[in-house]
Amino acid sequence: MIRLLLTKFKNILLLLIMSAMVLSSANTAHGNDYFKYSVGEDYIKVSVETMATQQRQCEVVVRAGEYQGKAGKRIYVNNCTVHLPDDIPVRNDNDGRGFYVSEWDINVKEAKALVNKLQSMGVNAKLQVATTKAEDLNAAGRIANKSNPYLYVSIHHNSYESNSTGYFGMYNPKNEASKQAAIRLSNAIQNNGQVPKRDNRPNTGYIGEMNVINSTTTPVLLELGFFSNIEELEEICSDSYVNYVSTNLAKEIQKMLNENYR
Ligand SMILES: [Zn+2]
């Protein structure tokens, strides 16, 4: 009985913590990707939904994480001094908070480039972009499940401190193929010369999209650099970084498909 009460208390506490996190991310300029990964494994279990095997409609789904202008997934910038290519918009909501870059725009650039490279190599790849909140988080995983790909690659960029740096892969700790995919894909881009490699991380926190991916699909989430660091923001948006990362991820994905999936 006491045990049961303790468990209940833990769940309620967790709900309170999560609510506070959601509220704080909505009210601050910095995102909290870093915090959500720190939630202990004891509290939230990663669950994998199994569904009836569906026709494979493509080999790889590349998802551009988040959706346009998502609160907490943006960095406010000085629009006069920041150096960004034309395809990364500097947005302004005219709410007195000034100009910002949305993580979504960076994710879309990288994800589009990756799909283009994959398709040019003959891989049947599909781009998945959320136009609204309704296609984010768990819904993003469920949308991908309809295509039943071999691989689900979700592209993100991170936000924490203004001097945070590096990229890493996230994987489902209950799925060895997911872990191997994170290792292979993060190793494939380690010589990019601009953004350092960090340790890959198990997805023990709340990342809705990976929690609902079919057991017939290997999920991996890539955090390809910190947009909260202006110097790194300029690097991860640059054509040279996007070109290097998309080319080398595509080559490794093609190898993985040939060795393990096709
Ligand atoms: Zn993200």
Image: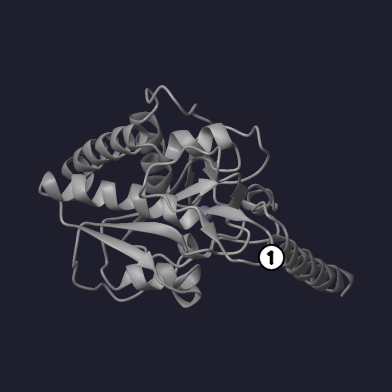
Give the left or right position of residue 96, taking residue 136 as reference. Answer: right
Nearer-the-camera pick, 77 or 17: 77
Give the left or right position of residue 127, taking residue 11 as reference. Answer: left
Residue 160 in the image: x percent, y percent? 65, 43
For label 1, the residue is: 26
Give the quadrant of the N terminus.
bottom right
Look at 26% across and 69% down and name the residue there: 147
Q: Amino acid at mark 1?
A: Ala
- Name the element at disc 1: helix
Nearer-the-camera pick, 205 or 198: 198
Look at 73% across and 63% down and name the residue there: 27
Give the left or right position of residue 85, taking residue 53 as reference. Answer: right
What colour scheme governs how the chains and residues are painted in the rendered image of this protein? one colour
Give the left or right position of residue 126, taking residue 34 as reference. Answer: left
Residue 199 in sight in this render: no
Nearer-the-camera pick, 223 or 60: 223
